[in-house]
Image (cartoon, rainbow, N blue to C red):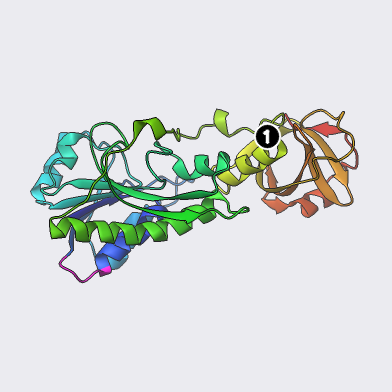
């Protein structure tokens, strides 16, 4: 079976590797990925995508694309005569591209569809405090993330798991589901199910605006927000006029004293850096102040003079 694989970030790499090492008539005829990212320094070499690096290590042909709507891209895909197109963490493909696959094109999505359709399912599942998530393979159709479901696999979310850790686990789980999906397609018998629109929820793209911490929210919600954005793009706030990223925190005692403190108030107590939420205090454990390196809260406190409620996050 002739396969074109499309993906860019680390999440897609285990699936590419799993297909490439499967000895059941699967042939990856082309790997499609995004173009190399320019480095910040003008003298530095551009950075290849994780998928490009993995494909090179496997000796697979790579095609880099910027504009998936370019007719030249559709022609390139058609010239490869794919039986199946496998998509994992890539762009939204036009029908002119995915319809070139003789037996269909499917996507690996990091949620249990129809929950968390969109660009950031892992992040939003954590932000919303879900205790279970998973992966889904589904056939592509014109409306994004709405195609018929092929396979799903569930997994519990650990209470302290962050988005980076969960993405790593789901990428490995997803690789197995991708290979099983290919076996079903090769067999000619694919049991699909239609998504229930009544159960659909959204996972919109993360932006500067929607990753800012709202200190008036309950402490548990703020902690989930921080977990859901760690380690990238990261939840952030403003501290004394500078951006501060928060990588890790832990709920404090919501029955703590001094409930009169305003949300966002910074407090140092018994060597701990605390921030006031809507219903109590949150202990900050790992952070980065603008212009400084990432550090544990203890290191931050050693370099600061904040021993009272003299500052506030906004």
The answer to whether residue 206 is seen in the rendering is yes
Disc 1 on helix, strand or loop?
strand
Lateral position of residue 195 relative to residue 25, left or right: right
Q: Position of residue 9 (x, y in %)?
A: 39, 51
Residue sitting nearer the eye, 253 or 165: 253
Q: Is residue 106 part of the magenta span, yes or no? A: no
Q: Main secondary structure of the magenta part?
A: loop
Looking at the image, which residue is at 18% across and 69% down? Answer: 24
Q: Which residue is mark 1?
A: 237
Q: How many marks?
A: 1
Image quarter (top left, top right, bottom left or bottom right) of the N terminus: bottom left
Q: Is residue 87 left or right of residue 117?
A: left
Crowding at mark 1 (Cα within 10 Å: few <14, some 14-19, many 20+): many
Please tell me whether residue 26 is drawn above or below residue 89 in the rendered image. below
Q: Where's residue 16, x and y in %?
A: 30, 59
- Res. 8 visible in picture: no
Magenta residue check for 24: yes
User: Which residues make up the magenta segment?
Assistant: 21-25
In the shown orientation, is residue 224 left or right of residue 266?
left
Q: Residue at x 15, y 67 (%)?
A: 25
């Amino acid at each position: 079976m002739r396969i074109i694989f499309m993906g860019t970030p680390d999440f897609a790499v285990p699936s590419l590797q799993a297909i490439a090492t499967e000895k059941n008539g699967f042939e990856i005829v082309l790997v499609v990925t995004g173009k190399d990212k320019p480095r910040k320094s003008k003298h530095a070499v551009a950075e290849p995508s994780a998928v490009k690096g993995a494909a090179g290590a496997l000796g697979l042909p790579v095609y880099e694309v910027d504009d998936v709507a370019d007719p030249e891209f559709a022609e390139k895909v058609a010239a490869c005569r794919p039986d199946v197109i496998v998509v994992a963490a890539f762009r939204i493909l036009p029908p002119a591209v995915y319809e070139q696959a003789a037996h269909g094109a499917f996507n690996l999505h990091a949620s249990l569809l129809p929950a968390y359709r969109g660009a950031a399912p892992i992040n939003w599942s954590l932000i919303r405090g879900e205790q279970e998530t998973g992966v889904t393979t589904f056939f592509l159709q014109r409306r994004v993330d709405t195609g018929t479901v092929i396979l799903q696999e569930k997994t519990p979310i650990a209470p302290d798991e962050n988005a980076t850790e969960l993405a790593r686990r789901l990428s490995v789980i997803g690789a197995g589901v991708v290979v099983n999906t290919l076996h079903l397609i090769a067999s000619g018998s694919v049991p699909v199910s239609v998504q229930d629109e009544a159960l659909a929820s959204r996972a919109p793209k993360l932006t500067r605006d929607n990753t800012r911490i709202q200190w008036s929210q309950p402490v548990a919600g703020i902690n989930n927000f921080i977990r859901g954005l760690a380690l990238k793009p990261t939840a952030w706030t403003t501290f004394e006029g500078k951006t501060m990223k928060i990588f890790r925190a832990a709920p404090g005692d919501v029955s703590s004293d001094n409930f009169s403190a305003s949300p966002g108030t910074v407090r140092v107590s018994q060597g701990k850096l605390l921030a006031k939420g809507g219903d109590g205090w949150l202990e900050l454990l790992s952070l980065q102040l603008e212009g400084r390196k990432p550090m544990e809260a203890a290191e931050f406190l050693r370099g600061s003079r904040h021993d009272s409620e003299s500052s506030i996050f906004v």
